[in-house]
Amino acid sequence: MSTIRHSHYNICRHRHASESAGAFRIAVLADLHNQVYRSDTRSLIKAVRDEKCDAVLSAGDLVLMTGGHFATDQARVLVSALAAEVPVFLCDGNHETKMKRFRPQEYQAYDESMKNCGAVCVHNDSADAELGGVKVRITGLELDYRYFRNRYRMRLDEGSIKALVGESRRDRFQILLAHHPKYFGEYANWGADLVLSGHLHGGIVRLPFLGGAVSPDPSLLPHYDHGLYESGISRMIVSAGLGTHTINIRINNPAELVIADITLN
């Protein structure tokens, strides 16, 4: 029996003079870690299909890379099935980045398999698409591993983002896939209309009135743990994720499939 929660968000923006009105639906995947928590890949594929989305976007960590263990088989099954039906766009998270650092040949094989099944990989790069009559730019921001650990005290600014991925597009609906939600203010300043993030697994343990308890940085009670956030005209959706790693536990925090309906009017 599937225990995947479907979370729906509506994102609306007034179109610019150079844009066309329209609407589209996307499914957002994050933090699968090669196994859906208390469910399975087949159920997740069906859940995405049932939502009748125009595209699927991954905010990273579809794979598992912890210690000496490296697993990608369920990520490959998932992406292969979905990419045969709708456009799929992938950005790496810190687990893919770790794999790339320590097992570059295996990472290369995994990345090539994603491309061969039809997925578009945006590694500090962008891809353009037209979804529901809306011209969209999808950019994948992949940060150095030090940005994921508090002890390095890494700062990120608009200039650093531009150095990695270039300028945002003002004549398209600009989506930024950025695995770590910590830098939402900087993503907004760069020019993202919509940021899609994960990484925090919803805080692992969700407490009434307080939200997520733990961040893998590590830190307690992370600010951007789950849900919808706003900064000026920018919006960010933080997925609670689909899986676990290292400690196989999620409390008050089921696996989550995010569905976003975007409208330009």
Image (spheres, rainbow, N blue to C red):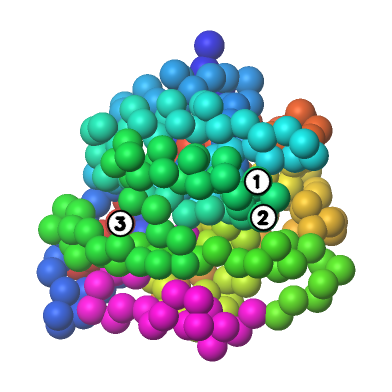
In this rendering, the answer to whether 165 lies above or below 200 is below
Crowdedness near tag 1: few (<14), some (14–19) or many (≥20) residues, C-alpha within 10 Å? some
What secondary structure is found at the residue carrying circle 3? Answer: strand
Q: Is residue 112 visible?
A: yes
Query: Is there a contact, CB below 8 Å, between mark 1 and mark 3?
Result: no
* Residue picked out by circle 3: 262
Q: Is residue 74 above or below residue 60?
A: above
Give the residue at mark 2.
101
Q: Does residue 171 belong to the magenta stretch?
A: yes
> Is residue 54 part of the magenta span, yes or no?
no
- Residue underneath mark 1: 103
Q: Nearer the viewer, mark 1 or mark 3?
A: 1
Q: Is there CB contact under 8 Å for labels 2 and 1?
A: no
Amino acid type, callout 2 = Arg
Q: Give residue 171's position: percent from left, percent from top.
A: 23, 79
| Span of residues in magenta | 156-177
Tell me the residue at 15%/82% (across/down).
17
Q: Residue at x 14, y 80 (%)?
A: 18
Residue 243 percent coordinates (x, y): 63, 33
* Spot occupied by residue 234 in the image (x, y as percentages of width and height): 44, 73
Task: State whether residue 140 is above or below residue 113.
Answer: below
Q: Is residue 164 above or below residue 240?
A: below
| Residue 176 is at least partly visible in this image | no
* Residue at image coords 41%, 44%: 112
The extreme front residue here reads 105
Q: CA distance from mark 1 to mark 3?
A: 38 Å
Q: Going by the picture, which residue comes out furthest to the top?
A: 1
How packed is label 2: few (under 14 Cα within 10 Å), some, or many (20 or more)?
few
Q: What is the number of the mark on residue 164? A: none
How far from the left and from the top, in percent, is residue 19? 16, 74
Q: Regarding mark 2 in the picture, which secondary structure is present there?
A: helix
